[in-house]
Image (tube, rainbow, N blue to C red):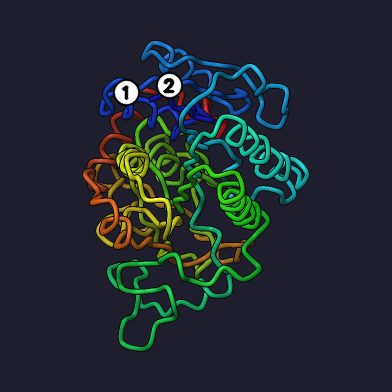
Amino acid sequence: MKILITGACGFVGSALAEFLLERMEGVELVGIDNLMRPGAETNRTRIEQLGVEFIHADLRSASDLMGVPACDWVIDAAANPSVLAGLSGTGSSRRLFEHNLAAIGNVLEYCREHKAGLLLLSSSRVYSIPALVSVPLRERNHAFEIDPTGPLPNGLSVEGIGVDFATTAPVSLYGATKLASEIMALEYGSTFDFPVWITRCGVLAGAGQFGTPAQGIFAFWVNAHLRRRPMSYIGFNGSGHQTRDAFHPRDLAALLAAQMRTARTVGQRIYTAGGGPANAMSLAQLTAWCDQRFGAYAPAADAKPRAFDIPWMVMDNTQAAADFNWKLEMPLATILEGIAQHANDHPEWLEVSHA
């Protein structure tokens, strides 16, 4: 089997490549990356040493894909991953459109031409911001969690947010590009008869992630705490109770491998995947973990709300587990320890990733 990974020099793309080469017998990997992201070059040598055929190409340019060899599957891990993308100071809205929509159009044309299956990595941020803000929550142990004492909206359970949760606008410019990508992928797959699996991912985290406040928050927080960099609890009364679940790309890769092995051609094509309730943690709890690991250091409190911020996001893995016999192997404590060890070994990491 031959697999093309877009965004192969990013944290997720490179980690997927490493896992697939370890776990899938006889697999060949081709990786594409435009190397625009600060720090991406650090992964190029690593994946080439693993045996990945690397191609320096920009997915926004259709001609860049003309020389890419035919593959059986495409894992699309290339996109601007920040919910703040397109806002002033975080890159232009035009660039967001080009990276997240024009690029996926070229990937879909590649899949059409080669009859390649598509594994599209989507986002938890395709969900309606007003609906997310209205999720019934309670505070416990310095974190928000679902309040199950009353009725819950469709698509929400104590296990987290599922596929059927509301996706009505507004979802942010970034969320809209991911939702539109999902629709186009499903339509292309149906029209041109190639398989499409879509995974709406929660927060992906692990050692070697490029840590910035808008993305890679777990890696950023650990590195910034260790280096005593400025850190803030933004919004939600400056409490740091905002909560996310996290999972490692190696666990995501196990799900993608199971999807590629699945012969089913009808039925559900969109799934949610994340750390789930067991791997959920608030910023305040993450600070407490860092205090124990590195010594006490208190973030500032900034109660002013920020665009698109939500108090809680935990993904429901129930359906992915049922349909693909998939379960998480890496607990959050192991993920955090890996990030901490990497931070100790790479004191320059925030500069490498321009955080």
Q: Tell me where residue 319 appears, x and y as whole percent.
A: 32, 61
Q: Is residue 74 left or right of residue 343?
A: right
Q: Helix, strand, or loop for circle 2?
A: strand
Name the element at disc 1. Answer: helix
For residue 113, above or below residue 308: above
Q: Residue at x 71, y 49 (%)?
A: 86
Task: Name the residue nearer the viewer: 244 or 55.
Answer: 55
Q: Position of residue 215 (x, y in %)?
A: 51, 45
Q: Is 246 positioned to the left or the right of 349 in the image?
A: left
Residue 4, relative to residue 195: is it above or below?
above
Picture mark count: 2
Q: Which mark is residue 29?
A: 2
Placement of 337 over or under 161, stated as above or below: above
Tell which circle, 2 or 1, labels the residue nearer the N-terminal end.
1
Amino acid type assigned to the residue bearing label 2 in the image:
Leu
Of 323 and 247, nearer the camera is 323
Question: Is label 2 in contact with label 1 (beta carbons under 8 Å)?
Answer: yes
Residue type marked 1: Leu
Q: Residue at x 49, y 48 (%)?
A: 231
Foreground pick, 124 / 65: 65
Q: Residue at x 58, y 74 (%)?
A: 130
Label 1 sits on residue: 21
Residue occupying image coordinates x 28% and y 27%: 24
Q: Nearer the viewer, residue 284 or 76?
A: 76
